[in-house]
């Protein structure tokens, strides 16, 4: 079955460490996205990529980095520069344009300890 | 940038009652409009979408929404609430170039027995 997989489901990070969240899709979608979800704030766009080897900053890119070396993969690194990284992170993919909307992964909950 | 407003962060209805979740957007150009549902600690699932076809759209689980350009609204309704409808609902509007979505802050629906 086609889908989008995020791992791990739960992640704990010590302050000052970088961590990488994985996102893989086998839907043959060109576009991939990373959103951050905080209670009462909805989903906020971190980064997105419409083609391999290209990506754009979203509304809250500071303290995050991404790469898109393969069509199937769009990992997100939360760096030590991100001041408040504890959140639920959602990866999504889509065809372009967005006639069919996003397909979402099941999310990664990151907690700084 | 587009913006999406969901009135009411929490809505409570009795089982069998009408569900009405409100969504307004800011755009001078008719966008794509989507409603998603999220259950705890999961990704988002597509409920229904408007992409410039019929203004009244039907989705899964008995939900429907009407696109009203004059009111810049896309409210979600269901005639009779079921306990399984308890979840968080997000309205999303496409960007002007239709390559990403902006999400509302979400509405948590509680269904009372």
Image (spheres, coloured by chain):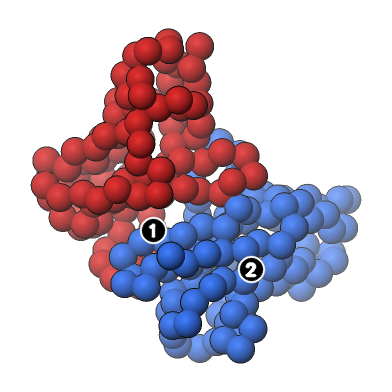
**In the shown orientation, is residue B91 left or right of residue B21?**
left
Q: Is residue B60 above or below residue A15?
A: below
Dot 1 falls on a residue whose secondary structure is loop
Chain rendered red: A
Q: Position of residue A12 (x, y in %)?
A: 45, 16
| Dot 1: chain letter | A
Q: Would you name the residue on which mark 1 appears?
A: A102
Element on which disc 2 rests:
loop
Residue at which label 2 appears: B23
Please state the horizontal and vertical placement of residue A76, each as a whole percent of the image.
Answer: 29, 34
Query: Which color is chain B depicted in?
Result: blue
Q: Is residue A76 visible to the viewer in this orientation of the structure?
A: yes
Q: Who's the residue at 16% across and 55% down the image?
A: A51
Q: Is residue B83 visible?
A: no
- For the N terminus of chain B, give its image quadrant: bottom left
Q: Residues within 10 Å of mark 1 (few under 14, many from 20)?
A: many
Please identify, in this view, whether the residue under mark 1 or under mark 2 is nearer the observer.
Answer: 2
């Amino acid at each position: 079955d086609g889908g989008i997989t995020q791992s791990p489901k739960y992640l704990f990070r010590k302050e000052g460490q970088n961590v990488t969240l994985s996102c893989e899709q086998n839907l043959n979608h060109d576009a991939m996205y990373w959103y951050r979800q905080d209670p009462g704030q909805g989903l906020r766009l971190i980064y997105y990529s419409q083609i391999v080897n290209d990506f754009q900053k979203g509304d809250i890119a500071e303290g995050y980095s991404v790469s898109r070396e393969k069509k199937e993969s769009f990992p997100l690194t939360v760096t030590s520069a991100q001041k408040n990284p504890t959140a639920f992170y959602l990866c999504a993919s889509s065809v372009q344009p967005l006639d069919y909307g996003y397909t979402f992964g099941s999310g990664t909950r990151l907690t700084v300890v | 940038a587009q913006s999406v407003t969901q009135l009411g962060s929490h809505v409570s209805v009795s089982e069998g009652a009408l569900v009405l979740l409100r969504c307004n957007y800011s755009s001078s150009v008719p966008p794509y409009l989507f409603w998603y549902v999220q259950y705890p600690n999961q990704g988002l699932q597509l409920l229904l979408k408007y992409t410039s076809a019929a203004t009244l759209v039907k989705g899964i689980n008995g939900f429907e929404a009407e696109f009203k350009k004059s009111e810049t609204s896309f409210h979600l309704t269901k005639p009779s609430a079921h306990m399984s409808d308890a979840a968080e609902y997000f309205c999303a509007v496409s960007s002007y170039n239709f390559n990403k979505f902006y999400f509302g802050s979400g509405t948590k629906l509680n269904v009372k027995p």
